[in-house]
Amino acid sequence: MLCQIFVGLSRTVILFIVASGLTLILGVLRIPNIAHGSLYMIGAFLAFTISKMAGGGTFGFWLAMAGAPLGVALLSLVCERGLFQYLYEREHLMLLLLTFAFSLVFGDLVKLVWGGEYKSVPVPPAFQGFVPLFGGLPFPIYNLFLLILGPVVAIALWLLVNKTKIGKIARAAAVDREMVGAVGINVSWIFACVFVIGCFLAGLGGALVAPTVSVTLGMDATLIMEAFLIVIMGGLGNVWGALLGALIFGLTQSLGILIWPQFGIIFPYMAVIAVLLFRPTGLLKSTW
Amino acid sequence: MLKVENLHKSFSGFKAVNGANLHVAKGEIVAVIGPNGAGKTTLFNLVTGILKPDAGSVRFRGEDITGMPPYQVCKKGLSRSFQVVNVFSRLTVFENVRVSVLARENKTWNMFTPAKKIVTPETERIVDSVGLTGQKDRVSTMLSHGERKVLEIAIALGGNPEFLILDEPTAGMSPEETGRCIDLIRKLSKDFGLTILFCEHDMELVFAIANRIMVMVRGSTIVQGPCDEVRCNQAVQDAYLGGSDACSA
Amino acid sequence: MGPVFRKKNLIIIASVVLLFLFPAILPRFYVYMAAIVLIYGLAATSLNLALGFGGLYQFHHAVFYGVGAYGAALMMMKTGLSPWLGFIVGPLIAAVLGLVMGLICIRLSKLYFGMLQISLGSLVWAIVYRWYSFTGGDDGLHGIPVPDLISSGSAAYYFTLIVTLICTYMTYRILKAPFGSVLQAIRDNTVRSEMIGVNVRRHQLMALVIAAFFAGVAGSLFVAVDTTAFPDMLFWTLSMEMVIMCLLGGWLTFMGPMLGAAVIVALRTLVSTYTVYWALVLGIIMMLVIFFLPEGVLGWLMQLSGKRRETGPENNEQKAALAGDR
């Protein structure tokens, strides 16, 4: 059972990475990026292609882990500069619907480029196999890798948001974009940066998850739902909130399925509702 | 009619209102003046229920309305206009006022009778009384700034109030619009019998129409009294009017 | 007002007559599609009551549609009572769900409201999806025993047409009544509405319940026409499609959503015969509408013909007030 929980936790890492990107975009740009799930999916498919082209071994894996998120980031930059930036002045609803339109387009683009069958990305040799954990229970090494990577990403993000100049400007822009603009900073480019970083994280999540699941169409629909719920639970714009939310979500999901296999998947939803009933703006402070 | 006693309100440690006192008798026109940031709008928000005070009380016609939600305060006969133009952007002038009248008449739950069959005469009366008859079918975003501020007042009138609070009614208005607004305020007081409380930065306007003045500085009331008394008060002169104001006669 | 008024009435009467003639002049498939259009149109119109006229970020309207369908279907399948009751119970359950969800969500504003609604709706979806023994799980329900009177294609169509006309008319009356005026005022400015004595939360809640009820009606009509119910009817992507219908048709107009539904359904049927990439097409259409036709087709047409009252360029103050009101 402990093993189950840990496997659940490694899935949590993926959820956290994707959700952190989502919450960054939501916090600074105030856009609920519905296309985030599709970008995650593209990340996974890109990882498949890159890994396959590079021969599938360790080198291929690392190339895919770097290349897929970068590809997604590039795609998001094009979309943002090309279309998004013209809508910042419009009503909120329009931006949201635009991201939904993108999710539709991306979804079908994936179908067009990669076809409908599911793909698989091989786990690199270094990470194959199991490790004995907690008195002999076998635990997949790849999942261990994810568990270690999670906090690394969290700390890296924290440093980025709190210690770098861009991070500080972005946080200021989140609270008062007019003031930041009035001080002479090009808010538009800040937004573009944050957006691209957020989408990079989505792609990274997709690339990382690829070796553990079958890469298929439809990955995006359930994931975006879960990512949004995590972000709402944690507090809009709060990266630590995304971590907390992902932990709660992942744990309740694993526990739920263990305790009540048929309806276990409703446990995370109930957790979200419970949190929102008592703290409607999320567990941690949001930037709104 | 309105009695505000020792009101306090802080926002994350910043004391916006720090022991404000105010009383307005029926039929009076009272002005609240003070430098920017003195807490005038916060005071109005506290009185009308948009904010809840940390301490102190607000009594209207003897009844304690401290902390009551805005829609209940309105039903008691206290209406208010806003400093930043706060009208219904997609509705016409007529529709803007009509909603207010409908609310007052408690007809907002009616789902069957076409709205244009009821409250039309009352709505038109109010629109006429503020002088916006020519614009009544124009969407509110098409009005000039001054006209929209008058619409603000018209919406407040829709509630058939006995007490009207106006937050900087002439802010941003041209001189002629300001003149018209002054006439309107006088008319509301004389012909309609409304008790009026307002705040303004235009001192000439204040001294022209107010019976009494309350001066706020940094969240506290420093003096309340008739115009002349306030004009010649030393503390007020130093804080706000500029010490050199000639106080002859 | 004379000639314009009469012209609009004539168009309405002519359209209604035409709709009644459909089964006589169109092949069965088109009659079925017309019924589907009416159903989605009713659902979209009910959504627009909350969204376009009420200003609520109603992001998961499909829940009410789906619950109405399942309510009706389960009444017909699992109880021995008259199947006609299904058409009453379905919408009622949807309305009750609307009330419950509303009570939970209404305390929040704007985006939080929408997101919480999605969470609650997803919970309902998850329950329906998993409860194989009761709701048929991801298989859905099939072969639902609808009343004999409406079991034929044309009869089901007529039933749908009549019910949709009645519901649409009722929604129209509600919007033209004081309640509708107040709702629109709340949409434009909640703070001001509170200040003139309107209990904003309660009015919004009522709008939500009414919208949920009519969506439930649409759902139960679907059961009548298709004799099936399935979990996708509750999935958030359908909710987004409904929002698209409202936007495409014109979310500030009354008939806009109906028009949007017609366009979307027609396009989907047409495009699907040529290609499997319907989502791509829909996405591109959405982008075009967002950038070039934000008022929707009907809104744009009304602006052209001058019927829409003039809305001037919004000045910065209003925009700032609107933008700041998050």
Image (cartoon, rainbow, N blue to C red):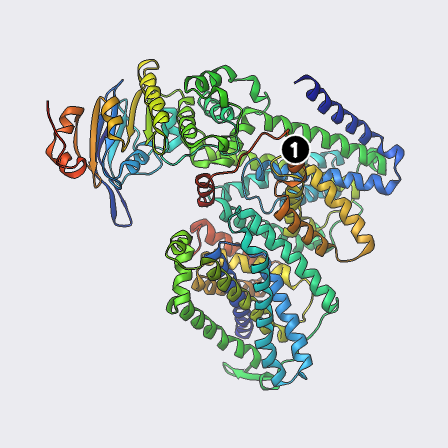
Left or right, B11 with reference to A160: left
Residue C249 location in percent, x, y? 67, 40
Question: Which is more toward the observer, C32 or A276?
Answer: C32
Residue at screen point 42% across, 56% down:
A174
Left or right, C164 with reference to C112: right
The answer to whether A6 is drawn above or below residue B78 in the figure is below
Please count the marks in the image: 1
Residue C88 location in percent, x, y? 68, 34
User: Which subunit holds the residue at mark 1?
Assistant: C
Can residue C29 be seen from the camera position used here? yes
Residue at the farthest front position: B175
The answer to whether A44 is drawn above or below residue B143 in the figure is below
Q: Is mark 1 on a helix, strand or loop?
A: helix
Residue C168 location in percent, x, y? 68, 31
Quarter residue C147 falls in: top right
Left or right, B78 with reference to A63: left
Question: Which is more toward the observer, C292 or C108?
Answer: C292
Rendered-image quadrant of the N terminus of chain A:
bottom right
Residue B174 location in percent, x, y? 36, 30
Q: Residues within 10 Å of mark 1 (few under 14, many from 20)?
A: some
Residue at screen point 44% across, 50% down:
A280
Residue at screen point 81% across, 36% down:
C156
Amino acid type of the residue that numbered disc 1 sits on in the rendered structure = Met
- The residue at which mark 1 appears reads as C302
